[in-house]
Image (spheres, rainbow, N blue to C red):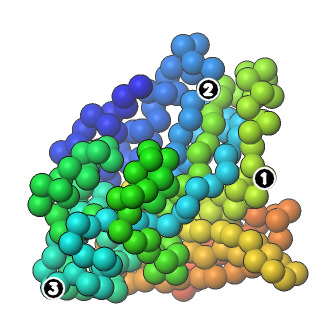
Amino acid sequence: MTTRGDQILDKPLAKIGGKGLFIKELETALQDGRAHLAVHSLKDVPMVLPKGFALAAILPREDPRDAFVSNRFKTLAELPSGAVVGTSSLRRAAVLKRKFPTLNFAPLRGNVNTRLRKLDEGEYDAIILAAAGLIRLGMSSRITSCIAIEDSIPAPGQAALGIEVMADDDDTADIVAELDHAPTAICCAAERMVSRLLGGSCELPLGAFADFVEGEKPLRLRAFVANVDGSQYVEVEAFGTPDAPESLGEAVAESLKSMGAAAIIKSLQ
């Protein structure tokens, strides 16, 4: 199915309604009974689902990192001053502008093939995409290098797939539940809570990424909030237990607010 997010390509997502534009038509198909389930990139799913819908499963996460793609350069650090880097994400642009202030970050829309074609035609010196998308499409050979998590904390739910059903469709939910990957679901619950409490949208550069480490509190959550040009930036790392991922998300959101995220968010509004 084609969504409005796929159709409107001449404007930034933040200006036309945000990531939710990629799922509305699919939810309408569920509601009308034309589909039993919808598969979404979880980072495009709003933090609060419309009434009557439910996430029945979250599948194992693919590589969560952002991918650097270029035909002439191996890394962002190799790009010359003034080089043009294409990205559709305010998050990516904000966090990378901090580290590479001499680069020009320009809007890039369209499906993966379209974005790669624009790079190949010379419109950009490099582009930044989700590594997971390229891998799932069998295009991992186009990844020049991956950007470390600590240099570009992913969007909440990045690289995970979510399966949505109607909340009252118990039969489909029971079948789909077998596909649920608990470790990924736990991590995404923590990440999405950060975004939910901070009002995360396409207009707010925000990243949140949870993973498992060794220790008494093995669930690690890293998150940041920035303004659009990356000149204001706050980041938090915290640890919790797998049985309370949303509590960890709440704690991180409150820490970010106290460190200056609230002021950043207010300035963007």
Residue 259 appears in which quarter of the rendering? bottom right
Residue 121 x, y percent position in the rendering: 12, 55
- x and y percent of residue 167 in the render? 71, 28
**Residue furthest top in the image:** 33
Q: Quadrant of the C terminus?
A: bottom left
Sooner in the amino-acid sequence: mark 1 or mark 3: 3
Under mark 3, the amino acid is Ser
Residue annotated with mark 1: 182
The CA span between labels 1 and 3 is 44 Å
Residue at position x 38%, y 63% in the image: 143
Is residue 224 something that shows in the picture? Answer: no
- Nearer to us: label 3 or label 2: 3
Q: Residue at x 57, y 30 (%)?
A: 38
Whichever of labels 2 and 1 marks the residue nearer the N terminus, that label is 2
At which x and y percent is residue 59? 67, 46
Using the numbered discs, state the Cα–Cα distance from disc 2 to disc 1 in whole angstroms.
Answer: 19 Å
- Label 1 CA crowd tier, 10 Å (few <14, some 14–19, many 20+): some
Q: Secondary structure at mark 3?
A: loop
Per the rendering, the mark at residue 221 is none
Q: Callout 2, which amino acid?
A: Leu
Bin the neighbour count of mark 3 within 10 Å (Cα to Cα): few under 14, some 14-19, many 20 and up: few
In the picture, the disc for residue 37 is 2
Instruction: Write down the residue under mark 3.
Output: 81
Q: Amino acid at mark 1?
A: Ala
